[in-house]
Image (cartoon, helix red, strand yellow):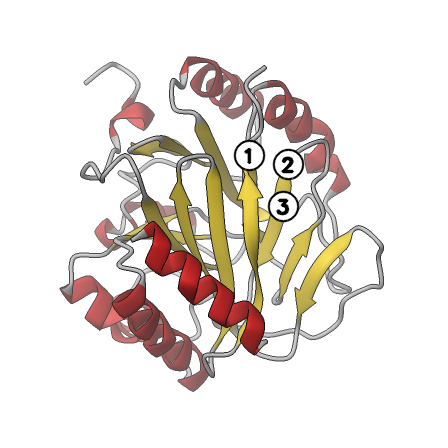
Amino acid sequence: MARVFSSLLLIGVLALAGADPHAQLAPPAAPRDAVRFAVIGDTGTGDQAQLDVGRQMVAARADVPFDLVLMLGDNLFGRATRREVSDGFERPYQPLLDAGVRFYAVLGNHDAPENRLYPGFNMGGERYYTYARGHVRFFALDTNVLDAKQLAWFEDALRSSPEPWKVVYFHHAIYSNGKRHGSNVELRVRLEPLLVRYGVDVVFSGHDHLYERWKPQKGITYFVAGAGGKLRSGVRASDQSAAAFDRDRSFVLVEIAGDEMSFRAISRTGAVVDAGVVNRRPDT
């Protein structure tokens, strides 16, 4: 399957029960040789653009059979009422849900705190949590309230993680050239030392409603993937930006096999707007 993904990637480039409840939220195990997932952010509109992204995710899954989706916050713009859940989550992704794909969310600034209780987001009622798939450890954080307790939990979870790959995701981007929000430097000061010290490889965030990939910062590759439902054009020119796309909604498709992470950013029309490979950081 890794060879299939690599071929598709080339085509895309050429075309364009412990006491800690957070540690118990592990989805079913996946093969250790490949972990596949999609990434969406700022999705909860329920409009035609979000439906189009959902259809492209279904189409992509026919080639790369992911069974996990990272949700980067602003999953619903308000409380998880029956209407909001139906329009902003279940209807756009129903074929994926029917196929057993699991969505794992973090909260955004437009999500109600109690949305963490909605079963479809698989947060187990927690604001932050961790889980593993094969050789990949995922860390889901709440950057709405990044208090000392969460930071202490995060450091302990990073320190105790035996998986070679570490993927972190949260809502507010600490590296972004989006004109509306841009980089949250205060969060960067608090989070980046831990990300660097404990060998995090990749960070996904939303908040700015566009797609962007940064050149590695202190060895870490940062993605902004906040255009799963909403769109806000405007990217500042920067020599640190490796790629950016702010003309349409999009999502990111990922496969991690061995020490390589292959990725494609795909628009709601199916165009591949960015693609490449991230190599795992050497063990320190």
Kindly identify the amino acid type of the residue bearing the numbered disc 1.
Answer: Asp
Q: Residue at x 76, y 57 (%)?
A: 177
The residue where tag 3 is placed is 222
Residues under numbered marks 1 and 3 in contact, where contact means CB atoms less than 8 Å apart: no
The residue where tag 1 is placed is 201
Residues under numbered marks 2 and 3 in contact, where contact means CB atoms less than 8 Å apart: yes
* Picture coordinates of residue 112, whole percent (x, y): 43, 53
Q: Is residue 64 above or below residue 122?
A: below
On the picture, is 179 further left or further right than 140? right
**Tag 2's secondary structure?**
loop
Q: Tell me how far mark 2 sits from mark 3, CA to CA.
A: 6 Å
On the picture, is 8 further left or further right than 267? left
The residue where tag 2 is placed is 220
Which one is in front, 180 or 16? 16
Which one is in front, 189 or 175? 175
Which one is in front, 100 or 141? 100
Which one is in front, 247 or 254? 254
Q: Is residue 57 above or below residue 3?
A: below
Kindly identify the amino acid type of the residue bearing the numbered disc 3.
Answer: Tyr
Q: Tell me how far mark 2 sits from mark 1, CA to CA.
A: 5 Å
Return the disc, 2 or 1, that comes first in the chain's sequence.
1
Q: Is residue 166 above or below residue 104?
A: above
* Picture coordinates of residue 59, whole percent (x, y): 31, 74
